[in-house]
Structures are given as C-alpha cells and as structure tokens.
C-alpha cells in the first residue's frame, strides 16, 4: 500500500497540483494531503491506517456522519436498478416534493450536478426574468467557480492569495458588483449607482467560505427590503446552510424569504448534486417551460437522487439532528471562548448551529477584510498540531468547521483538550 506522501507525488504528475479541488492540496498549511481510505460516522482513516476525528464532513454533505447505513442501502438498491437513464424517474419527483415541503416558499426545484451549476443557473434565470445583467455579490462569499462568481470569492481563492482567476473575461467580471458583507450601505450604494440594472443580489445567508461569518441582526432583512425597492431578486446561496441550519435552511432560521435559493452538498448525501428553486412564477421561466435554457445529461441521476432522498427524508422526520448538532456547536464555541480567555490568545470564535470557525485574529470578524487579518501562519501551526493529535480540520483558515449528528459531546471535549495543550505551545 502506498502512503499519502508517495500517492501525492504520483498524483502531481497526472493531476494539476495533485488534487481535483484546490483546497485539498494543503498549500496554506504545509505538508502533504492525507489520502483517505474510508470513513464512518465522525471518523476518517487515511491510507496509512491513521484514524482522525473529522470536522470537514466532505465540506458539508455529511450532516448525518459518514457512511450512514440507511443511505448506503438506498444507494446500493438504486444502483442495482441502473446508473443513469437520461429520462425522468419517480425519485426526482419525490425529491422535489420533499424539498418543497421542507422549505416554505420553495414551490419548484430543478436538479443539477453541483453547487457551482446551481448558482450559475439561478443567476441566468434571474437575468432572464428581470431582463437585467448585473449581479451584486459580497466580498468573501463563494458561489462556485463560474466566471461571473470568481470575483472576491473567498476560501480557496483567498488562501491562494489570488483575488480573481486568469481566464475570466473582464467583460464578464464587470457585471459582478462587489459589496461588503454585513454592510447594507454598500449594497444600497451599488443599487443606486446601477439603477434598474441589477438582476439579483446573491448572498451566503451565513458566510461559510471566509471562515464562518454570521449575518448581523437585520442584515438579511435589509437585503430583502433593498431588493424589493430596486426590483432585484434576492438569491440565498444555501449550498452550505440549506437543510443544515434548519429543515427550511437559512430562510427558516432567520425568518427571511429569498426569491431564489441554491442548494448542493447536503441534498446529495455525498453524491454530486445541486439544485435551485423558488416560486413557480419565476421557475417556470426555465426551459422547457420557459425561455431560460438549462439542461444536464446526468441531472436527477437515480443513484444521487436515492442518496439525497434518503438523507432529506431522515432530516424531515428526525428533530434530534438539528437539536444535537446545534448543542454540539454551542459546546464548541463556548469551550473555545473559555480557552481563548484563559490563554489570552489573540483568537476569536464564531458559530451558527452546526457551523463554527476559530479565527486567528482577536476579531470581531464581520466581513472579508476582518477575516483576512487572521494570522494564517499561526493557523497552520494549530492545524498541523491538531492533525498530529488525530483531529482533521479543513486545511485553511477560511473554511468552516462542520459538525454532524455522528459527533458526540466527548468528541468536542477531546478537541477542546487538544486545543488547550496546543494553545500552551503556540501562545
Ligand atoms: C461549495 C459551495 C458552492 C459550490 O458547490 P460545488 O458543488 O463545489 O460546485 C457554492 N456555494 C457555496 C455557498 C458553497 O459553499
């Protein structure tokens, strides 16, 4: 059996940077990525056989923990019936019915294959529906890697220190206006300065790709009002928050209605799935019902739908998942806050429900500029110290800590004890 380091060397010969998504490369924390052999519950094992307590959860999908037996069975059964037909199936109807039941105001959904695709399609729909071209996003919010959204996009892009990407035409980026998270004045100024030109404001209702930055009280409500005043659609990118913060996602959690929502991660239960949805009146502009084109050979794939349907069905019925993960989130943020005070550590901690982040800056962190003040070298020392102690966190300061229903109070306690030791070494 090859070890992770040797596999990474081989990978770099045949895969750009040795990985199929940049943040996996460990570039900002040093060392080599761990190649994963398997995962179960809250734990993952690398090819060397080392076991880690996992706080990445595949970047969000694994709200129930890894390898949930019910989901594995649903996937196995679906696969036995055929992997793809390119024709409609009953499961697609069931998933759409379930999603629209769980999320109020969600009347129709279209399945796609990733969060990137969901956002790209929702923006095309917003433009088609409003007849306007410009879109407002927030610095530090990530909405996938479509051209127009690779502007001040947070996490992977941010860690690499590259504000934009090569290959994005200036003309395309020019239609993306960037506002400051938690700053309604910055949004209003853009809307005023581009009167009747803004198709949509897109936001992560909890920013979770610049670390975790919760919306300030009134921020999401304010966006709703501004969009109504200016005839722009409000798009919640719920690729992380959807079905995670609550059954109805951030819309339910914060009591704010969006015109369109995008989903991914959790709704595929670990399979590649995305979706976007909203009111019928808007969604019926999508082809073949309407004139906004969007298609997908593998969209609504039977195996992916089986995984998503199973995970969402569990979430629809089981209150304990949301209660438990929120309780663990609180235990983590409170415990970390205590440690920070006791060690006089220049850190701050944020959290909403099952999402949390330890920022290596005293904070408060309310936007991208403040998040960027983090001491990423100190984060790298902390990250590697944790990894060596058997705790697998995202290999970047600007990513979320994802808790799952498979984690326990003892698991959180173990993290806090390890952090206590590490803070003594670092500070
Ligand atoms: C992960 C993510 C995306 C992109 O989803 P992919 O499936 O990686 O394409 C979009 N928006 C948000 C908020 C995300 O966290």
Image (cartoon, rainbow, N blue to C red):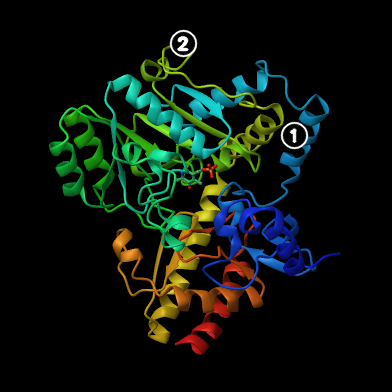
Label 2 environment density (alpha carbons within 10 Å; few <14, some 14–19, many ≥20): few
Residue 286, by quadrant, is top left
Q: Nearer the viewer, residue 185 or 413?
A: 185
Residue 143 x %, y %: 43, 43
Provide residue 217's location: percent of width, then percent of height. Answer: 26, 51
Say which of marks 1 and 2 sits in front.
2
The percent coordinates of residue 169 (x first, y second) are 38, 40
Residue ID at (55%, 27%): 111
Q: In this rendering, would 382 be left or right of 272?
A: left
Query: Vertical placement of 143 versus 182: above or below?
Result: above
Q: Is residue 255 in sight in this rendering?
A: no
415 over 324 or under it: above or below: below
Q: Is residue 370 visible?
A: yes
| Label of residue 226 in the image | none
**Secondary structure at numbered mark 2:** loop
Residue where numbered disc 1 is placed:
74
Tell me the SS state at disc 1.
helix
Which residue in the protein does label 2 denote? 289
């Amino acid at each position: 059996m090859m070890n992770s380091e040797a596999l990474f060397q081989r990978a770099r010969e045949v895969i750009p940077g040795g990985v199929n998504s940049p943040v996996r490369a460990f570039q900002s924390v040093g060392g080599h990525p761990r190649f994963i052999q398997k995962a179960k519950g809250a734990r993952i094992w690398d090819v060397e056989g080392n076991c880690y307590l996992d706080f990445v959860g595949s970047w969000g999908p694994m709200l129930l923990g890894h390898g949930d037996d019910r989901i594995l069975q649903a996937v196995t059964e679906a696969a036995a019936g055929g992997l793809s037909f390119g024709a409609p199936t009953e499961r697609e109807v069931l998933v759409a019915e379930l999603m629209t039941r769980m999320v109020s105001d969600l009347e129709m959904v279209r399945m796609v294959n990733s969060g990137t695709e969901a956002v790209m399609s929702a923006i095309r729909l917003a433009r088609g529906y409003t007849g306007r071209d410009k879109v407002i996003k927030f610095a530090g919010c990530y909405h996938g890697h479509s051209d127009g959204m690779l502007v001040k996009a947070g996490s992977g892009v941010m860690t690499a220190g590259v504000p934009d990407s090569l290959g994005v035409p200036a003309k395309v980026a020019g239609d993306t206006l960037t506002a400051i998270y938690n700053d309604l004045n910055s949004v209003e100024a853009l809307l005023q300065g581009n009167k009747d030109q803004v198709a949509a404001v897109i936001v992560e209702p909890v920013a979770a790709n610049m670390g975790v930055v919760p919306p300030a009280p009134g921020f999401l409500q304010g966006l709703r009002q501004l969009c109504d005043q200016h005839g722009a659609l409000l798009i919640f990118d719920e690729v992380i928050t959807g079905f995670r913060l609550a059954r109805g996602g951030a819309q339910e959690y914060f009591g704010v209605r969006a015109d369109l929502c995008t989903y991914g991660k959790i709704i595929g239960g670990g399979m590649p799935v995305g979706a976007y949805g909203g009111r019928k009146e808007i969604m019926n502009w999508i082809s073949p019902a309407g004139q906004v084109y969007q298609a997908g050979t593998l969209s609504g794939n039977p195996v992916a739908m089986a995984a998503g349907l199973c995970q969402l069905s569990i979430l629809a019925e089981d209150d304990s998942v949301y209660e438990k993960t929120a309780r663990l989130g609180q235990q983590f943020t409170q415990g970390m806050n205590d440690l920070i005070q006791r060690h006089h550590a220049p850190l701050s901690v944020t959290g909403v429900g099952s999402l949390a982040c330890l920022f290596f800056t005293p904070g408060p962190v309310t936007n991208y500029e403040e998040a960027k003040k983090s001491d990423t070298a100190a984060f790298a020392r902390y990250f590697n110290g944790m990894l060596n102690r058997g705790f697998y966190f995202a290999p970047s300061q600007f990513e979320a800590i994802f808790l799952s229903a498979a984690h326990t109070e003892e698991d959180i306690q173990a993290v806090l004890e390890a952090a206590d030791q590490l803070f003594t070494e670092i500070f």
